[in-house]
Image: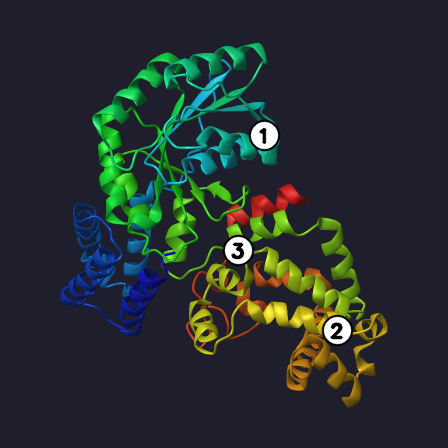
Amino acid sequence: MFDSLSDRLGGVFDRLRGRGALNEQDVRDAMREVRVALLEADVALPVARRFIDAVTEKAVGHQVLKSVTPGQQVVKIVNDELVAMLGGEEVVGLNLEARPPVVVMMVGLQGSGKTTSTAKLAKLLKEKQGKKVMMASLDVNRPAAQEQLAVLGEQTGVATLPIIKGQAPVDIATRALQSAKLQAVDVLMLDTAGRLHVDDALMAEMKAVAAISTPQEVLLVVDSLTGQDAVNVAQSFTAGVDLTGVVLTRMDGDARGGAALSMRAVTGKPIKFAGTGEKLDAIEPFHPGRVASRILGMGDVVSLVEKAAAVVEKEEAERLAERMMKGQFDMNDLRSQLRQMQNMGGLGMLAGMMPGMKKAKAAMAASGMNDKVLVHMDAIIGSMTPKERQRPELLNAKRKKRIAAGAGMEVQDVNKLLKMHQEMGRAMKQIKKMGGLKGLGALFGKGGLDAAMPGLGAGGPGGGLGGLGGGANIPPELQNLLNKKN
């Protein structure tokens, strides 16, 4: 998501940064392009207009235009306003400070991902916060809706209210409350019925259920792929129900992202969670600052580290690091790393989260390089014998031909993999000369990127990598995360 918007904005800001001096007309011309980019991304017109006015007012100030790096200053102002439009720096989670059972009511249109999001949130609360959760489906209209939630409950290990056919939604809500109290449940998730469009019957049902259950949280589930229509849905629900937050689904899709950018401004309520895939653990708290950085091509290192921490076993990572430092990096280790990359979302996702890698991601797409490359490499390693994996130097022309045939690849693909393995081995030896893994501290420590790799920091001839300025210390969010892991 946001790829097309990010590309458009990247072009505008590259031109701004490339000019030594800026005048007011330069800024206004750039903001006109930004406005068009926002509207093409399906951002609501009033929201886009307010955003452009706020940025222009701050950017045409004397201090900005006369500064040493006016282009960079304008980009910073855009970043700050983007964060504000998305809801500010603070991440707003669920408010569960109430006498249990705390009721969380999920509302939205049919097909928006309400039932799946209910199960995802229940799993998150159970596993990450240690809450005892129960789910109840109030959807008596959609065929097998209640059965669907029951199946999801079995998959997540979360209790669901037994189904009694013929009960009205209000009666089900009453029974769910009684059952939750008897079982000492911490959080009760109510999955309400949806409609193909907002109507009076839907709103009346929502209000009746809310009156019975007095929910602490009322979350509107919106499909981010619906673009401008998502904003209209949000406005309708805001007028009829007292919402406390928004859950955006399908944030991993290729939509233009306007719904996410407009939602906070239209509803006045925070975006609390974002659904990022079909799996039941593919939901994460919405971080406005990180999303803004991703849109502006500055990457999202903190989310990348969090994803790595969730996917990579600490013991396995330490074992691999130790072997690499000793120069014992074989094909089994390379295969382990390739699989970890696949589990983290593949090459495209990793490139999108790394600062300054936007152009690299585009180059990968242009050359036809995609996540299938990882699968092909895995297949080549799988075609080797255990001895060949441990000692790749044994591979002669005859063995390479056999391995290529076994993997359904060409010999040149085997050679590429071997070259990659050799390059990684050389890189590990270089790191060892720097003092091992501790030597990498120079990347973020005193002296910044320039101290470790001269020319790549902000002081380098290339202008530096976006978001990794020379001399900058490790980001505070990332430092906090690393402290927790130690």
Estimate the spatial distance between the alpha carbons at disc 2 and disc 1, rounded to whole Å: 41 Å
Q: At which x and y percent is residue 269?
A: 31, 33
- Give the quadrant of residue 409: bottom right
475, above or below 348, in the image: above
Q: Residue at x 78, y 57 (%)?
A: 319
The residue mark sitting in front, 2 or 3, is 2
The residue mark sitting in front, 3 or 1, is 1
Tell me the tag on residue 126: 1
Mark earlier in primary sequence (2, 3): 2
Q: Residue at x 16, y 46 (%)?
A: 46
For the residue marked with disc 2, what is the amino acid? Ser
Query: In this figure, which residue is indicated by the disc labeled 2?
Result: 383
- Look at the image and tell me whether residue 30 can be seen: yes
Q: Is residue 231 left or right of residue 166?
A: left
Q: Is residue 233 left or right of residue 271?
A: left
Residues under numbered marks 2 and 3 in contact, where contact means CB atoms less than 8 Å apart: no
Under circle 3, the secondary element is loop
Q: At which x and y percent is residue 232?
A: 22, 40
Front one among 390 and 67: 390
Query: In this figure, which residue is indicated by the disc labeled 3?
Result: 473
Q: Residue furthest left?
A: 25
For the residue marked with disc 3, what is the amino acid? Asn
Q: At which x and y percent is residue 460?
A: 46, 74
Tell me the tag on residue 47: none
Please state the total of marks drawn on the protein image: 3
- Look at the image and tell me whether residue 435 can be seen: no
Q: Residue at x 46, y 16 (%)?
A: 98
Estimate the spatial distance between the alpha carbons at disc 3 and disc 1, rounded to whole Å: 36 Å
263, above or below 458, in the image: above
35, above or below 204, in the image: below
